[in-house]
Image: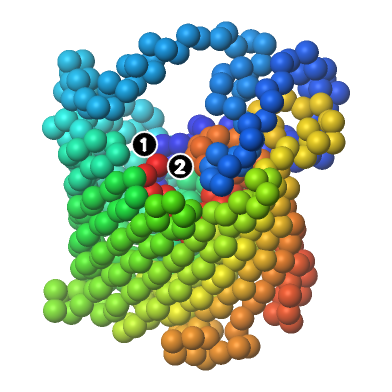
Amino acid sequence: MTSRPVIAAALAAAVAGASLAAGGSCGAATAAAFAGAPRAEPAAPDSSLDHFLGAMSDSTATYFGATAAHTDTAGLDSALTYGLAHPRARDRHGRFPFSYRPDLGFSRVDGPVYGAGASVGRAFALGRLDGLVQWASGPNDVLGGATFKRSIGTLDAAWSLELYAGRRTDGIDRDSDDIQLAMLRAFFSGTDYKHYMRRDGFEGSIARETERWRARAGYRDMLERPMATSATWNLVNAEPVVVGNLPAAQGRNREFSLEAGIRTPGVPVWAEIGYASSSGATSSDFEYRRTRAALAADLSAWRRIAIVPQCAYGRLSGDPVTQASFYLGGSNSSRGLLGATRGGTGMALARLDVIGADDVLALARMPHPAWLPIQIGAFASAGAVWGADPYGGPPRGGLDWPDQEHWVSEAGGALLWRPGLPDPAGFFRFAYAWPLGPEWDNARFTATYSRALSLVKPIGQ
């Protein structure tokens, strides 16, 4: 398990924790410190969520107030334009730049992970080679591997080749890739709901991505193994919310995969579909076909509100392999279900988010720093899984669609903060979800980090 954005994510998490502990407002000292700082006027919102979520200017003065010096960016803009049009112009500084870094991680299956990584080369030149070596102190195991990336074209339209060989820890839910955030939650408070598995072997992919669409074909030849819990401690010495680890199916997996996504021109709608197949014909230990499709939109109402409807559907046929199943729960699906607490060979989910563009602290005339705009939002969702239960429970009824009794629904409200780190389009969401049916016992408060368009992958960003 790697931790490249650990420092940035930890800083963002620490700031979020401080604001939550202060009751969602600045203290007297903070208010006094920012009282004399210049305030940037909020930009007029448009139909793109990425433009008006946060209502922040991109200028350094907005982020740092009076301590920031205004810079003449005319020359920088010209250099950026030339660099994007001539990606090879930077080769004069060397085709093989070298960098290295420490690498730290933590999970309940690996315990503390210590390592170091290095990279050489450029993806848009002759290629970039990344190497990583780690020691997982819990199972006393050596992890690591090498990744080669080669891209041809420009940043707006490029072909890319990626090859990997090594041993790593992955999440069992393949539709949720927030492993770095889960690692931070595990270390600081023990609130990690993810389940993990070990993968050893090789995988490669070739992809084409433009500003409007992307396509990818991949192949994986890996030994997949279950993992056991080896560390139950955390920084605040709290009992972990999840102690055990869902066991993955063990075997050699030779899997082919295809993905495609599109962002429609003129209309803020995203659509994607993915297909994966593992077969005994390629000497794989598993036999399955997995299909997932998703659709999302980013709409504007009165230029003050973002309306984000999303839906996803998935089916797994053949062997009910744990690491190929679908899961429901967590920030990327049903927020009232903590983590991927439900699983099956079929999944259906619909969600609607409504997010205000205005900074509610500014509307309330509450003193606060410019980097801490708070939006208010509401949401509702309905979802279900059916088929074989990877947690060992009885199968849920349904073939291509779930039986009615398996649906769970929720509605709730949230406060949102968009820090800009580690993902410029991501934000912290402090939400309260109410159940809309007999399936849940209590309403729940959750603190999560995710994109608004969480059911589809970004295109052209």
Q: Residue at x 60, y 88 (%)?
A: 404
Amino acid type, label 1 = Gly
Q: Residue at x 18, y 79 (%)?
A: 280
Q: Which mark is residue 106?
A: none
Amino acid type, label 2 = Gly
Residue position for label 2: 105
Q: Quadrant of the C terminus?
A: top left
Could one spot residue 434 in this view of the protein?
Answer: yes
Residue 181 position (above or below residue 61): below
Q: Residue at x 22, y 20 (%)?
A: 90
Residue 455: x, y in percent? 49, 60
Residue 217: x, y in percent? 22, 59
Residue 311 position (above or below residue 165): below
Name the element at disc 1. Answer: strand
Could one spot residue 173 in this view of the protein?
Answer: no
Mark 2 near mark 1, Cβ–Cβ under 8 Å?
A: yes
